[in-house]
Amino acid sequence: MGPKRRRSAEGENKQQNRGSVVTRSKSSSSSSNNNFNSPVVVFAHGAGASSSSDWMIRWKNLLTDSLNAVEVVTFDYPYISKRRPPPKAEKLVEFHSDIVKTIASKYPQHPLVLVGKSMGSRVSCMVAAENGIRASAVVCLGYPLKGAKGAIRDEPLLQLTVPTMFVQGTKDGLCPLESLEVVRQKMKALSALHVVENGDHSLKIAKKNLKLAGISQEEAEQHVVQAIAMFVSQIIGSR
């Protein structure tokens, strides 16, 4: 019997400012635009790196392919072009929400999925709870549950009614899995969890742990996107 590769668990329980960047990646399938089960995805970056980072580009491509997305849209929050530290997440909601509304209006018949890395996932959850945002699902890649001083920041999650998936590494200090499980039990929304064994906050696994598990980083990432695709497919199929 081969080494255990991953654990997963599921539970029911303004327009763009000057200098901002919006990029798009479309499915290579020519029939995607005619398949109304193909989602449109708005993908938000984390606090420290823009939408043009290698990580964001790689994951945008992974999501485009695995979800057969009609379009995956990434963008930069305004503070990026001003070379400033990120503001509080709450101050990014209006800008993020406007991006989402613009993209959703372009594809009114397609399911809307909000995806975010770290801070972007936290803001995505806040946006999903806004009036007028009809997201089918939210996917959080490395949700930053713990604040800088160690406080558990669960308010956005407890406000959600949209099905939400968490993808978390076991070595992510910003989201202890035991704390996340407590929060998931309190959430009104259906939630799912995919755990990346030995993954850090960016879901990266150290080389020694990859060797012990007998897998590559690329294989681990494929496990993640397959789990995301299954979750999104189940949610869209139940609409």
Image (cartoon, helix red, strand yellow):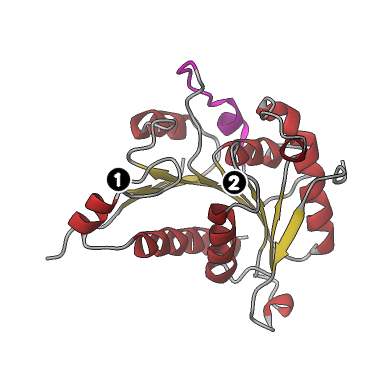
Amino acid under label 2? Gly
Labels 1 and 2 touching (C-beta < 8 A): no
Bin the neighbour count of mark 2 within 10 Å (Cα to Cα): few under 14, some 14-19, many 20 and up: many
- Residue depicted at 48% across the width and 22% down the height: 152
- Residue depicted at 77% across the width and 51% down the height: 21
Asked if residue 110 is positioned above or below residue 165 in the image, the reply reads: below
Q: Check if residue 117 falls in the magenta segment.
A: no
Q: Secondary structure at mark 1?
A: loop
User: Which badge, 1 or 2, is on the more N-terminal residue?
Assistant: 2
Asked if residue 214 is positioned above or below residue 29 in the image, the reply reads: above
- Residue depicted at 73% across the width and 33% down the height: 92
Q: Quadrant of the N terminus?
A: bottom left
**Which residue corresponds to mark 2?**
116
| Badge count | 2
Disc ID at residue 198: 1
Q: Is residue 24 left or right of residue 203?
A: right
Span of residues in magenta = 149-161
As rendered, which of 85 and 33 lies closer to the eye?
85
> Could you tell me if residue 147 is visible in this image?
yes
- The Cα atoms of the two marked residues, 1 and 2, are separated by 20 Å
In percent of width and height, residue 62 lies at 53, 65
Q: Quadrant of the C terminus?
A: bottom right
Q: Check if residue 158 falls in the magenta segment.
A: yes
